[in-house]
Image: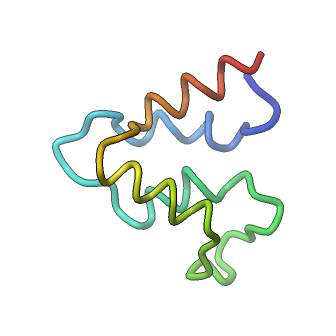
Amino acid sequence: MPTEFPKLCSKAHLIPAEADRELTDEDLTRLICSDCPFYKEGQDEELECGAYHLLVHLLRKEVLTVRDILDAVREQD
């Protein structure tokens, strides 16, 4: 498992890559923010950086999927 994004990889199985529902804000925060050194679960979770906004935009527009992100992260090995 990649060491740069261990939380993303460990939680990704909880979120269907091609779901019949839209990813919730909580899903996105768990996936995108959990490995950030500034992220503290349960604290200031409403604070969102530019990278978060960009990834959310790309996921919502279906330019990227969760599977695409996982594949890219895992290719770093």
Residue nearest the viewer, comparing 55 with 20: 55
Q: Position of residue 39 (x, y in %)?
A: 73, 67
The picture quadrant where one finds residue 66 is top left
Most extreme residue toward the left is 20
Q: Is residue 60 left or right of residue 73?
A: left
Residue nearest the viewer, comparing 53 with 4: 53
Q: Residue at x 27, y 34 (%)?
A: 18
Q: Is residue 49 left or right of residue 77?
A: left
Vertical position of residue 10 compared to residue 56: above or below: above
Q: Position of residue 4 (x, y in %)?
A: 80, 37
Q: Position of residue 7 (x, y in %)?
A: 68, 43
Residue nearest the viewer, comparing 72 with 33: 72
Q: Position of residue 76 (x, y in %)?
A: 74, 21
Q: Residue at x 64, y 59 (%)?
A: 33
Q: Residue at x 51, y 59 (%)?
A: 54
Q: Quadrant of the N terminus?
A: top right
Q: Residue at x 55, y 56 (%)?
A: 30
Vertical position of residue 68 compared to residue 21: above or below: above
Q: Is residue 75 left or right of residue 59?
A: right
